[in-house]
Amino acid sequence: MIEVDRSFLSWLANEETTPLGVFDHRFTSKWEWSASILKEVGAITPIEPPRLAAQEIDTQRRIVQTPFYTPAMTLEACQATDFSAFESFDNYCYAMFTFDQHVDHDNQLRFISPRFSNAVAARDDIFEIDEFSRVTYNSGRFNEKVMSRWEEMQIRAFKAA
């Protein structure tokens, strides 16, 4: 989505403002949830365009300030970073609930990174990898493993343990 959105974001002053690109979640639930996780771990940072920053905003009432984010680290930096402070079962459930929004009705992933199979799918029994290296999402296992805990969780927030 960063590549798609670059031409749309005319308010950016120059390439130095956002050298790695900008992501706009367009207040779409699945992308808002994903952005919340990436923001919490420090992988992306919010950007307020001048038109929003200039407005007087009651921050007590406003939950989401901006739909725009820029990467704070590369994929390589993410791979090398120690995220163990976020390793809790509740955070896992939050992340998998978020990921579930990106799965279609045939249990196929709507998008897949070349790194996904080895980094995630091969390590989690919610995913199945066939003999042709295609990844399928096991919704039954997701419901058993994640949704049972999701319903018990008092606070649904992704945060350091």
Image (cartoon, grey):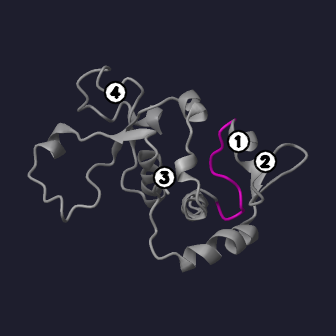
The first of marks 1 and 3 along the sequence is: 3
Q: CA distance from mark 4 to mark 1?
A: 27 Å
Identified at 45% across, 56% down, the residue is 159
Name of the residue lying farthest toward the right: 131
Is 52 contained in the magenta span? no
**What amino acid is found at the position of numbered circle 4 in the picture?**
Thr
**What amino acid is found at the position of numbered circle 1 in the picture?**
Ala
Quadrant of the rendered image containing residue 9:
top left
User: Which residue is disc 2 drawn over?
Assistant: 122
Q: Evaluate if marks 4 and 1 touch, with contact meaning CB atoms under 8 Å apart.
A: no
User: Which residue is disc 1 drawn over?
Assistant: 119
Quadrant of the rendered image containing residue 76:
top right
Q: Position of residue 60 (x, y in %)?
A: 18, 63
Q: CA distance from mark 1 to mark 2?
A: 7 Å
**What amino acid is found at the position of numbered circle 2 in the picture?**
Ala
Q: With 81 as the anchor, is 159 left or right in this view?
A: left
Q: Is residue 70 positioned above or below 102 on the image?
A: above
Which residue range is magenta in the image?
104-114
Which is the main secondary structure of the residues drawn in magenta? loop
Q: Position of residue 36 (x, y in %)?
A: 42, 53
Q: CA distance from mark 4 to mark 2?
A: 34 Å
Residue 18's disc is 4
Q: CA distance from mark 2 to mark 3?
A: 21 Å
Identified at 48% across, 52% down, the residue is 34
Q: CA distance from mark 4 to mark 3?
A: 20 Å
Helix, strand or loop at mark 1: helix
Q: Nearer the viewer, residue 75 or 18?
A: 75
Helix, strand or loop at mark 4: loop
Q: CA distance from mark 1 to mark 3?
A: 17 Å
Identified at 47% across, 58% down, the residue is 158
User: Which residue is disc 3 drawn over?
Assistant: 34
